[in-house]
Amino acid sequence: MDTTVTNATTGKVWGGGNQPMGASYGKLMMWFFILSDALTFSGFLVSYGFSRFKFLDIWPIADEVFTHVPFFHGNYPMYYVAFMTFILIMSSVTMVLAVDAGHHMKQSKVAIYMFLTIIGGGIFVGSQAWEWGTFIKGSYGAVETRGGRILQFVDAETGHQVALADFATTIETDRVQHEAKNGIWFESESAGTTYRLEEVVAGVQSHENILVRTETINAEGKKTVLDRSESLEILNQAVGVVEGANLVHNEYGHRLFADFFFFITGFHGFHVFSGVMINLIIFFNVLLGTYEKRGHYEMVEKVGLYWHFVDLVWVFVFTFFYLV
Amino acid sequence: MAQEHNLAIFRGTVKFKNNVQKIWGVLIFLSIVTTIEVILGIFKPDFLVHTNFLHMKLLNWIFIILTLVKAYYITWDFMHMRDEKGSLKKAVVWTSVFLILYLTALILIEGNYIYDVYQDGFIKWDF
C-alpha cells in the first residue's frame, strides 16, 4: 500500500495505475472528505460568529452558562468542558497508537488501543448529551420581557446569580392545566413553569437584596446589574417566566445562543457518534483478523484520520463557543 | 507498512527516539496548551481583556493562535501529515486555509456592516 510512484505502463505520473500523491485511493479520498467536512464546519462557525457579532452587547457569557459538573453541586465554570476536551484528545492519542501498532502488525495492541478510543468517544458523547440535558433543564431561571429580553436575578451583596426557587413566593391559584380530556378535545396546554410570574415578582418585592441583571454587557465585560428601584420598575415589562433553554425560550439570554449551541454541538456530537460506530466496526474487524489476512492495517489509519478530524473540529468549537 | 516517520518537531529542536515517544510528546504539548487556554478562560486577566489589537481583545487573539497551534500539531503528527508527500499536504492545507480565510473575511466585513446598522440606525431594544 505504500508503493511509490511507478512509471511502468504509461510512463507518466498521472496516467493511472500508481499513487501520484503518495497515498492510496482510500486514504486520499478520506483526506478530501475531511477537507469538505472541515469547510462545512467552518461555515457553521462563521455563521455563529456573524450572529454573535450582531448581538455582541447582549450575548451570554459562556462561563456563566456552563457551570455544572455531573454529580456535584456548585459553580464550576468551564471545568467539565475542559475535561471533555481532554478526553477527546486522549482518545485521539490512543487512536494514533493503534495506527502505529498497525504499522508493526501487532493485532492485539491495535485492538486494545482501538477499544480505549471507543471508550473515550463514548464518554465524550455521553458528556455532551449530559451538557444538553443540563442546558435544556436550566439552572437558575429567569424572566422574559415583552421584547424577548431576559432578566436574571442576583444577590445584592455577593453579586452571584440567584435561583427563582430561592426567593419566589408561593401564591395559591385555582388555575389548573387544561388537558384534552377535561375540556374541548382538541385543545390542551403544557404544564407551565414551576413558578408563575406573579410569584416571582412578589418574591422580588419581598426580598430586599434581590436585584435584576439585564443582558447588556458593560465596559468591564460584565452584565449590567440594576439598582433596587430600576429592578422593580423593569419587572413591569415582564411577561413570563423562563426556565431552561430550547428553541423558543432561553433563560441564559438570546434565543440564538441556544439555537447555535444545539446546532453546532449537535452536528459535532453526531460526527463523534458516527465515528464511534465506525470505530466499533473496524474494532471488530481487527479482532476477527481481517487486516492480518489483508496484510496491512490501512483501514485503521483511514478511520483514525476521521477520528482526528472530529477532535480537530472540537478544538475549534471549544475555542469559539466557550473561550472567546 | 513500516513507513518512514519524521521524528522531529518544533523545527528539529526536539527529536524523539521513536514514533510512540513522539506521540506522547505531542500529547504533553497539547495538554499544556489546553491547560493554559482553560486557565486564561477561567481567570481572564484584566490586561488581556482590556487591550485591543485590530479590534479584538488580546485574550481572544491568544485563544485563536493557541487553537491554530493545536490544530497544526494534531494535523501534522496525529494525522501523520508530516510524513505525507508535499503535493498531498498542499492539496489539503492550502485549499482549506485559502477558502476559510476568504469566508472569514467576507463574514467579518458583512458582520461589521450589520453591527454599524444596529449601532447608528434607528432600532431600539429597550422594551
Image (cartoon, rainbow, N blue to C red):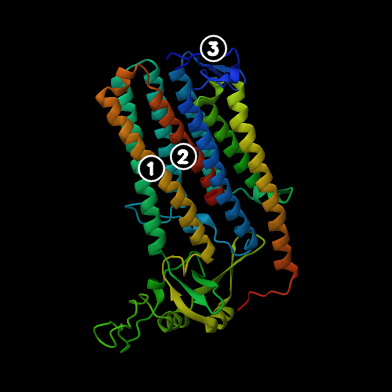
3D distance between C-alphas at marks 2 and 3: 39 Å
Tag 3: amino acid? Thr
- Residue at mark 2: A310
Q: Residue furthest top?
A: A8
Q: What element carries label 3?
A: loop
The residue that mark 1 highlights is A274
Name which of mark 1 and mark 2 comes first in the sequence.
Answer: 1
Q: Position of residue B61 (x, y in %)?
A: 65, 44
Residue hosting label 3: A9
Query: Which quadrant of the view contains residue A303?
Result: top left
Cβ atoms under marks 3 and 1 closer than 8 Å: no
Mark whose residue sits in front, 3 or 1: 3
Residue depicted at x 74% and y 71%: B121
Q: Of the residues shown, which amino acid type is indicated by label 1?
A: Ser
Q: In terms of depth relative to the viewer, which is nearer, A118 or A155? A: A118
Q: Earlier in the sequence, mark 3 or mark 1?
A: 3
